[in-house]
Amino acid sequence: MKNLLIVLLVSSCLTAQDKFPIVGNKNAVAGSGIWQENHEGVGLLCNHITTAEEVAKGSSEAVCFVVEAQALGKDDVQISRNLLMVKTWDKHGLTAITDFYFDKQGNEATASTPNAMHATFRLVINFDTHLATKYVEFPTKTLAYHLQ
């Protein structure tokens, strides 16, 4: 129930009722939709976490909060929450990333877990086209998901 409330809250707060899944500029970004390739629901919010003065100087830190919901079966939903650090942000878009580790069963792990596999979650948002793409980068391949 707690996860459902989080998803509903994020989804209701994120989107301006617009035809685009992403609404944003150099100050803030919000969006929700479905990853086209795997049909997971997603809500995201990106914002600067410093003062307006620091943003104006170009020395602010920014983060993206991403909540994804995957239906595993009837009455069975898996919720994942990710915090991504924004690496670049200008008037045309942003790129945010986070690294994570998982074991051979696909469960979250730490870097020190024996045989842990590493992946990078890269979120690229284009303000001009109002589109977002999530890249999940593994050492040998990259998967791309497009928000619709």
Image (cartoon, rainbow, N blue to C red):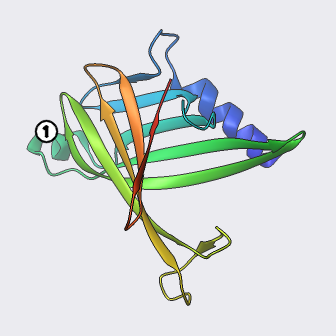
Residue at 47% x, 82% y is 111
Residue at 23% x, 39% y is 52
Which of the two residues, 52 or 128, is positioned nearer the viewer here?
Answer: 128
Which of the two residues, 71 or 13, is positioned nearer the viewer here?
Answer: 71
Residue at 35% x, 21% y is 130
Image position of 93 with respect to 112: above or below:
above
Image position of 111 with respect to 2: above or below:
below
Q: Is residue 45 left or right of residue 3?
A: left
Q: Position of residue 117 (x, y in %)?
A: 50, 75
User: Which quarter of the figure has residue 114?
Assistant: bottom right
Please tell me whether mark 1 sits on a helix, a strand or a loop.
Answer: helix
Q: Is residue 99 left or right of residue 77?
A: left
Q: Position of residue 56 (x, y in %)?
A: 13, 39
Which of the two residues, 20 or 16, is positioned nearer the viewer here?
Answer: 20
User: Which quarter of the figure has residue 137?
Assistant: bottom left
The number of numbered discs placed on residues in the rendered structure image is 1
Residue at 53% x, 11% y is 17
Image position of 119 with respect to 131: above or below:
below
Q: Position of residue 63 (x, y in %)?
A: 37, 49
Which residue of the protein is positioned furthest toward the front in this rendering? 140
Q: Position of residue 58 (x, y in %)?
A: 12, 45
Which residue of the protein is positioned furthest toward the left in this rendering? 57
> Label 1: how many residues lie within 10 Å, few (<14), some (14-19) or many (20+)?
few
User: Which quarter of the figure has residue 94?
Assistant: top left
**Three-letter amino acid code of the residue under disc 1:** Ala
* Quadrant of the snapshot with the N terminus: top right
Q: Which residue is mark 1?
A: 56
Q: Is residue 25 left or right of residue 148?
A: left
